[in-house]
Image (tube, helix red, strand yellow):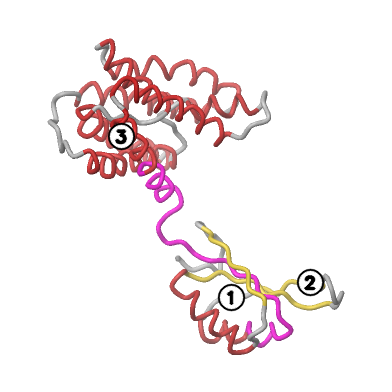
Amino acid sequence: MKKFMIRIFFITLGAFLAAFAIEGFLVPNQIIDGGIVGISMMISYLTKINLGILLFVLNIPFILLAFQLYGKMFILQTFYAVSMFSIFVGLVGGKIGIVTHDGLLVAVFGGMILGAGVGLVLKNSGSLDGTEILAITLTKKFPVSVGGIIMFLNVFIYTCAGFVYGWDKAMYSTLTYLSASRVIDVVLQGLNEAKSIFVVSDKNLEIGSNIISQLDKSVTYIDAQGGYSHQKKKMLYCVVPRMELTKLKDIVSSIDPEAFIAIENIHEVEGKRIKKY
């Protein structure tokens, strides 16, 4: 129950931030977001129907569609998130004033606040927009990716925005979407990006002992076989913070300048011997 209440709190906060970004930055400057939110904003602009009502009504079919794809908890939390989002948009619409009229500031900071709100909702197993649900459904019927469908839908939406608001507003809307997307990634994945490293060398035991002694990081040895030489050898694997990557590479190169190193980004690490990155 405690975890559930914390999740509900962050979903509520995320819905409020998204509503604040839309009413304080986007709507007054005729700049839109992508997906169902963007469609709702254009319809509201053309018909003068309350935006909060449109957000709720247009998302309901996708929430019902999600019953076939997700569990009951996700459906309930998404319904709550969409409801609070719609209520906040309706409450703050026209009451909080315009933060700025500068299109670039709106796209960057409005997008950042919107991304923070959407990211909080997504991180707590909810959703504010039915576009992703629709995309997942379509991928089951057509040989296309979720990302490809969402991109196609947003290209269509921003093209429509060009005819409705003008092409400069459509370009600012695209920039807003990119800004929001980046912040969503940060919220979901965190700022403290770590690195996973694979090292192939005949001196991996020596390299590993130096990593342990100098960086205080655990290493794992994996049995491997060379593709050309067919000789058995040890491959070294470890995870280090981004700030210590250069020092690790120095250790490897000082012991074996010809060692093969493969580096990947990772955003979350769990385990008994793992320190916070």
Q: Nearer the viewer, mark 1 or mark 3?
A: 3
Is 13 placed left or right of 98 in the picture? Answer: right
Range shown magenta: 179-208
- N-term-proximal mark, 1 vs 3: 3
Looking at the rendered structure, the kind of residue marked 1 is: Ser
219 relative to 190, above or below: below
> Which residue, as the protein is rendered here, is positioned at the far right?
230
Give the Cα separation between the discs numbered 1 and 3: 41 Å
Give the Cα separation between the discs numbered 1 and 2: 19 Å
* Residue holding disc 2: 224
- How far from the left and from the top, in percent, is residue 226? 81, 73
Looking at the rendered structure, the kind of residue marked 3 is: Ala
Q: Secondary structure at mark 2?
A: strand
- How far from the left and from the top, in percent, is residue 63? 48, 21
**Which of the numbered marks, if any, corresponds to residue 18?**
3
Q: Viewer-proximal residue, 187 or 23?
A: 23
Q: Quadrant of residue 171?
A: top left
Q: Quadrant of residue 80?
A: top left
Looking at the rendered structure, the kind of residue marked 2 is: Ala
Q: Where the C terminus falls, by quadrant?
A: bottom left
**Which of the numbered marks, if any, corresponds to residue 218?**
1
- x 67%, y 26%: residue: 142
